[in-house]
Amino acid sequence: MTGDFDRRDMVKLFGVLSAGLGAADAAAAQVPSGAGAATIHRKNVVGVQVKPWVWTGEGIDSALDTLQQKANVNTVFCYTFDGDPNRISQVGANLPDHGVLGPGGRTSGAFFDYDPKYFRDTSLNQFRSHDDPGLDVIRDVAPKAKVRGMDFFGWDYNNAFPSMMRWPGYTKVAEIDVYGKSTTSACFNHPDYRAHLLGKVRATLEPHADLVAGFMWGCERMGPLDNLIGGIFATSGISCFCSFCAAKGKMRGIAVERARAGYVKLDQYFRIAARHERPADGFFVSFMRILLEYPEVLAWHALWTDSYHEVRAQLYATAKTIAPQKPFGFHMMQNITFSPFYSAIDDYAKVAATADFLKIACYNNAGGPRMSRFIEQLCNTVFADAAPDELAPVYYKMMGYEQDAPAKIRANGLDPSYVAHETRRAATGTGGKVKIYPGIDVDVPSGAGDKHTTPGDVRAAVKAALGAGADGIVWAREYHEMWLANLAAGGETVREIFAQKP
């Protein structure tokens, strides 16, 4: 054991381990019988994600009217908790034609006045955002959405950002990397962090039964091997090797020090691969040799991901106990559509057991530059034997895509067939057990020379998603980033398509 680990932590540890031996399967068993069947879904969902400052900068009534009238929105995914507060800076000078942004340097945290009773079992109980202290998004926004016939969903977004570490107690639950350093990511095996996450579900759903119509939870993080391979959404640190994870690993029969040694060796190897100092037998052969020498690398990676699945299952079970008829689902980050490594371990079939809907990030315009960068990263790590243009055709075969060369997708974005492909893959992977809502790219930020959204792009993506059998769509990424002409094009398209449906 490492770090400040006292008797009280030991008691908490055994609580986590007893729940975690069966990983997600044990947590899924807590779901009330028939919970999924009891869920009531809105037909033809058209959703949008809205940051808290929109309500103060643009006005609640003005924003809701614009969304309903121009974009045909009937479901507002409102940030009740935001771990990524500073996307404000990514808009830069290209501020869309609605609202104002206000000051920068915003804080993460909750944007509603939660009842402290839901956080008695965790030290992470002081996380109300300091921004807009007079704004309670559930109290102030949900009633006005309801009057307009729009559903209000709590949207709990838990990315690993330094701003999260400013809150009392967050440094205590941080993941510890392979070198013993604290990271900006919270550990899913730390009891205080689990209690904090579960408390937010209870605090959002239980007291607000008449206002909150559903809940979406998201966290764009990956396990240690995916983080080492890198690409988009890789978080800092080869982790976690904290006391809780070490104890859980030992109970699984994993030699912790062997896992640690394997990751250190893999880290050193990838540094060589990035410099393209080719080993005698090539890069991929060398990568496989490390995995064969240290099978604990994959075992530790599976431990992290199983813990992540376990937490998602526990969140779902909690929500279904409180509100079995209300949809509870997950945001699925775009790496699940890019990375064969991440896609292999964040299996749709596992997620389907503990979700009512999935919002898939399949942003095709920004996806072009993102996929191009991911292919380049693969050529700096696992597949360093090849150049991006050489790897791309094989990569597309692996992923089932038909796309242009990396330079072209960076300039032109991904073909809308990518949206259709990922919609069908998610529906097939979940066995039709959950609703699939593809995220439609409406001005998702990208670089100055990269592809940017046009009204025609939005129309094509909507048609691709709904033509592939999507149960609805979500305008993405954030409302404050979107130009009204692009939103209006999307709204017109869904009206046309839904009008033709029986």
Image (tube, helix red, strand yellow):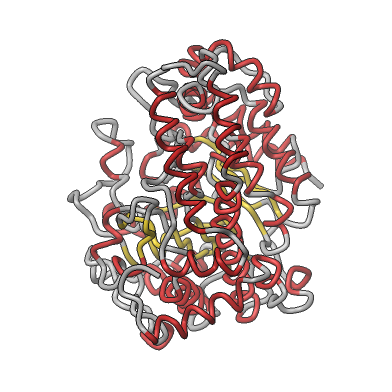
Residue 406 or 115: which is nearer the viewer?
A: 406
Which residue is rendered at x = 54% and y = 40% of the image?
334
Which residue is rendered at x = 20% and y = 50% of the image?
102
Which residue is rendered at x = 39% and y = 64% of the image?
81
Residue 362 or 167: which is nearer the viewer?
A: 167
- Tell me residue 198's x, y (percent): 50, 75
Horizontal side, residue 215 vs residue 240: left or right: right
Q: Is residue 68 visible?
A: no
Among the 4 quarters of the image, the one containing residue 185: bottom left
- Tell me residue 91's x, y (percent): 30, 36
Which residue is rendered at x = 39% and y = 33% of the image?
445
Among the 4 quarters of the image, the one containing residue 34: bottom right
Q: Is residue 11 visible?
A: yes
Position of the N terminus, as image quadrant, is bottom left
Horizontal side, residue 370 vs residue 490: left or right: left
Q: In the picture shown, does residue 449 fall above or below 29?
A: above
- Tell me residue 410's x, y (percent): 47, 18
- Tell me residue 187's x, y (percent): 43, 63
Residue 73 or 424: which is nearer the viewer?
A: 424
Total tally of numbered discs in the picture: 0
Horizontal side, residue 443 vs residue 125: left or right: right
Among the 4 quarters of the image, the one containing residue 314: bottom right
Horizontal side, residue 459 vs residue 57: left or right: right
Residue 276 or 49: which is nearer the viewer?
A: 276
Q: In the picture shown, does residue 229 fall above or below 433?
A: above
